Image (cartoon, grey):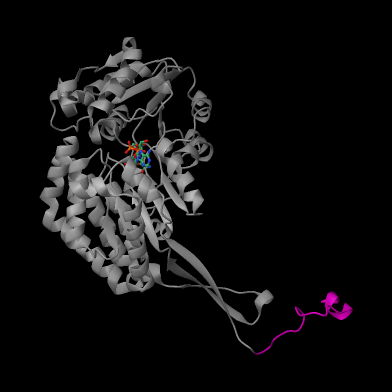
């Protein structure tokens, strides 16, 4: 595999795409049977190789077994099983009504696979973010190339090895690698690029796609606000914030809480309960806890340490770190200045600043002043505030009185808006992300009205 990694260049990429395009044109991937067989093989692979996959996730991120099972392995299996259950109905042409303008006629919308698609994924949920889009691409009948992240190398090579073993290699390929390999892939003409990562690389992907007029889905990140009202059940709210921020991959999660907004008056109470919950979940020294992932590598460790060092006088909970084990404890900071770097970029780690305001209504201005986030959260019992938040805050998705759980609902589309991305997936939305909804109008030869044909006589003009 290592050798292939080093030698994968533009020429090889072009050849691979040509081969896949030939296979796609043969019609192989379009059949219901092919799609079902591949999805079933994926489920079989997950069932048979579960422990290998969990081991790889542990190697890359020290992901606790249960967390990795629920959020990665089981999540991909559920997505595959849902696609298997619903595929017939998703593939069915949708009959639509016609009106007088085409009378007599009938019409339908035919779901058509886009063709040969590229999936580029991120390192933080490396199994889920690689295979969840691939499930959609297969269900929709496409040939697919997956480029997992080089920053989670154990999972990347496990995926490459297992997909080669279990899936149809004439239509599904994995290319491992970093910038050079991805650049070689991005030179090619794809029928869709599905990218998960940050906005900087998202812009590179979108520029490359533009050269070929290739549509993109960009699953990006952002600074996700959590607004906490004083009228909440603070025990439950704190539990859900701590679980969504620190139990989920140590804050290295795109939909995790990035910062909290609460009132000056309520902040001390909230901080107390958050501190207790952190201790309850991860013990007195959370850097020793095996129930928390580690920071992915020293580059990200130093990036987070720098964010923290600039505002270290604002730490109210945590702050411990150990570079040799890439561990940073859940850390809460109170009232960091708005111009500090930690408030300017996506944190993507276990640091959580709290911004305090006199009146919670100020949250709207604070959120609006930043680029649109991937997620926004509100904890409240105030119906009016809830309504105002849902209607006025623009974010990829919203959860009220919880964090991150919106991702677990396959009937909800998952994706960003503005700087947090474009397009969406999950459930049927994954099928749609890799499908062209082709409109087809059916006409007959009888009753052919002459009105539309020249010459346009005065009599016709009156009609
Ligand atoms: P990244 O943008 O650095 O990398 C993503 C992918 O792009 C990787 O496969 C990488 O190999 C490739 N890449 C990196 N540099 C490239 C270049 N110059 N040219 C071409 N390809 C390149 O992102 P990351 O660090 O892997 O992930 C973290 C980011 O992803 C965060 O911003 C996070 O919010 C976001 N994210 C979003 C979601 C989502 O579903 N919306 C999920 C996870 C992570």
Q: Position of residue 173 (x, y in %)?
A: 27, 58
Q: For residue 127, say whether it is visible.
A: no
Is 26 placed left or right of 36 in the picture? right
> What residue sits 83% from the left and 80% below the top?
455
Vertical side of 200 occupied by 414: above or below: below
In the image, taking residue 54 as reference, residue 106 lies left or right, namely right
Q: Nearer the viewer, residue 421 or 153?
A: 153
Q: Main secondary structure of the magenta part?
A: loop
Residue for point 23% across, 56% down: 77
Which image quadrant is residue 305 in? top left
Residue 142 image offset from top left, x and y in percent? 36, 64
The residue drawn where x is 36% and y is 63% is: 18
Residue found at x 32% / y 49%: 9
Quarter residue 293 falls in: top left
The C terminus sits in image quarter: bottom right
Ligand 1 image position (quadrant):
top left
Q: Give how far across and how far down residue 340 sits, in percent.
A: 42, 17
- State whether residue 94 is above or below residue 62: below
Q: Residue furthest right?
A: 458
Q: Nearer the viewer, residue 316 or 401?
A: 316
- Tell how many labels: 0
The part of the chain drawn in magenta is: 446-463
The reply to whether residue 276 is visible in this rendering is: yes
Q: Quadrant of residue 190?
A: bottom left
Position of residue 267 measured from the top left corner of the image (x, y, whole percent): 37, 18
Q: Residue furthest top?
A: 313
The foreground one among 420 and 216 is 216
């Amino acid at each position: 595999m290592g050798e292939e990694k080093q030698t994968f260049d533009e020429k090889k990429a072009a050849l691979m795409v040509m081969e896949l395009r030939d296979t796609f044109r043969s019609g192989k991937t379009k059949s219901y049977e092919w799609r079902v067989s591949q999805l079933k093989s994926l489920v079989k692979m997950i069932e048979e190789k579960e422990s290998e996959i969990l081991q790889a996730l542990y190697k890359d991120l020290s992901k606790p077994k249960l967390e990795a099972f629920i959020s990665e392995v089981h999540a991909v299996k559920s997505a595959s099983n849902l696609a298997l259950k619903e595929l017939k109905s998703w593939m069915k042409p949708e009959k639509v009504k016609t009106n007088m303008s085409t009378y007599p006629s009938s019409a339908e919308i035919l779901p058509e696979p886009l063709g040969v698609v590229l999936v580029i994924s991120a390192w933080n949920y490396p199994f889920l973010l690689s295979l969840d889009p691939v499930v959609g691409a297969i269900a929709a009948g496409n040939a697919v190339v997956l480029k997992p992240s080089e920053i989670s190398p154990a999972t990347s090579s496990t995926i490459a090895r297992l997909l080669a073993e279990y899936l149809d290699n004439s239509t599904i390929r994995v290319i491992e690698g970093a910038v050079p390999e991805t650049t070689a892939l991005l030179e090619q003409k794809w029928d869709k690029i599905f990218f998960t990562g940050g906005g900087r690389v998202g812009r590179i992907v979108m520029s490359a796609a533009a050269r070929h007029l290739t549509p993109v889905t960009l699953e990006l990140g952002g600074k996700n606000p959590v607004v906490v009202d004083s009228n909440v059940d603070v025990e439950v709210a704190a539990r859900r914030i701590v679980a969504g921020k620190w139990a989920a991959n140590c804050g290295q999660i795109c939909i995790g809480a990035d910062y909290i907004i609460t009132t000056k008056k309520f902040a001390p109470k909230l901080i107390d309960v958050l501190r207790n919950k952190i201790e309850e979940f991860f013990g007195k020294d959370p850097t020793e806890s095996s129930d928390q992932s580690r920071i992915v590598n020293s580059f990200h460790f130093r990036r987070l340490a720098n964010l923290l060092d600039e505002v270290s006088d604002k730490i109210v909970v945590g702050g411990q770190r150990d570079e040799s084990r890439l561990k940073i404890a859940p850390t809460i900071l109170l009232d960091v200045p708005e111009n500090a770097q930690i408030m300017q970029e996506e944190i993507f780690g276990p640091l959580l600043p709290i911004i305090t305001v006199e009146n919670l209504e100020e949250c709207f201005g604070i959120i609006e002043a930043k680029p649109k986030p991937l997620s926004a959260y509100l904890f409240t019992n105030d119906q009016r505030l809830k309504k105002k938040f849902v209607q006025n805050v623009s974010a990829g998705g919203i959860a009220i009185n919880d964090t991150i759980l919106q991702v677990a609902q396959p009937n909800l589309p998952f994706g960003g808006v503005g700087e947090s991305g474009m397009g969406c997936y999950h459930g049927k939305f994954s099928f749609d992300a890799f499908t062209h909804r082709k409109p087809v109008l059916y006409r007959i030869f009888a009753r052919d009205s002459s009105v539309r044909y020249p010459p346009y006589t005065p009599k016709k003009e009156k009609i």
